[in-house]
Amino acid sequence: MICFARFAYYTLIRDAGFFGLAAILLMMAFSFSLPIAFDAGGTAILLFAVLLLLRVAFLTEMRFQRSEAWSALDEDERPQGYDGLIWARAELETMMLRFAKTAAGIAGLLYGSALIISIA
């Protein structure tokens, strides 16, 4: 894995960690009612998935060059040329879509758990 892809991956891991922490704190805050707690956690994680999808939808080449994953790297660590820029943007889009897919799945599990607990 080249340096850009590794840095972009860990940037997305960090963002997912922050939203996961927010979801856990919301679930702890609503721990008096488990269905509400799971629902709040699912909502926080689903918000992360939606925000990732919005980032992908509005990711142009100019915005990509201002992104953290691109601008934090040194000149020699970035993919070279216009083809490298296109490849890196496509790689970041793919990673963000994978993270959004996983986050939506986790949100679905939390919503399903809230439904099962409320039925039982």
Image (cartoon, grey):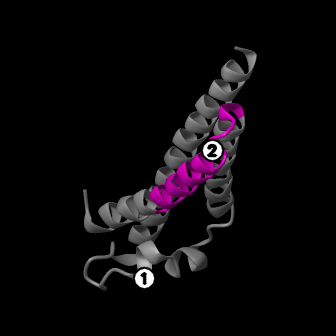
Q: Which residue is mark 1?
A: 71
Q: Is residue 36 toward the left or the right of residue 80 in the image?
A: right
Q: Report if residue 42 is visible in the image.
A: yes
The disc label shown at residue 81, or none: none
Instruction: Specify the segment rendered in magenta.
Output: 15-35
Look at the numbered disc 1 and give the secondary structure of its residue: helix
- Mark 1 and mark 2: Cα distance apart in space: 32 Å
- Which amino acid, by three-letter code, is at mark 2? Gly
Q: Examine the rendered structure and indicate whether residue 38 appears above or below residue 69.
A: above
Indicate whether residue 16 is drawn in magenta.
yes
Q: Examine the rendered structure and indicate whether residue 22 appears above or below residue 101.
A: below
- Which amino acid, by three-letter code, is at mark 1? Ser
Q: Which residue is mark 2?
A: 41
Q: Nearer the viewer, residue 77 or 13?
A: 13
Nearest to the eye among marks 1 and 2: give it: 2
Look at the numbered disc 2 and give the secondary structure of its residue: helix
Measuring from the top left, give residue 92's x and y in whole percent: 47, 60
The residue that appears at 65% across and 33% down in the rendered structure is: 34
Indicate whether residue 14 is drawn in magenta.
no
Measuring from the top left, give residue 115's x and y in whole percent: 72, 23
Q: Examine the rendered structure and indicate whether residue 8 appears above or below residue 36.
A: below
Q: Is residue 60 toward the left or the right of residue 66 in the image?
A: right
- Can you tell which quarter of the image residue 110 is in? top right
Q: Nearer the viewer, residue 29 or 14?
A: 29
Q: Is residue 77 toward the left or the right of residue 99 in the image?
A: left
Q: Report the predominant secondary structure element of the magenta stretch.
A: helix
Mark 2 crowdedness (10 Å alpha carbons): few <14, some 14-19, many ≥20: many
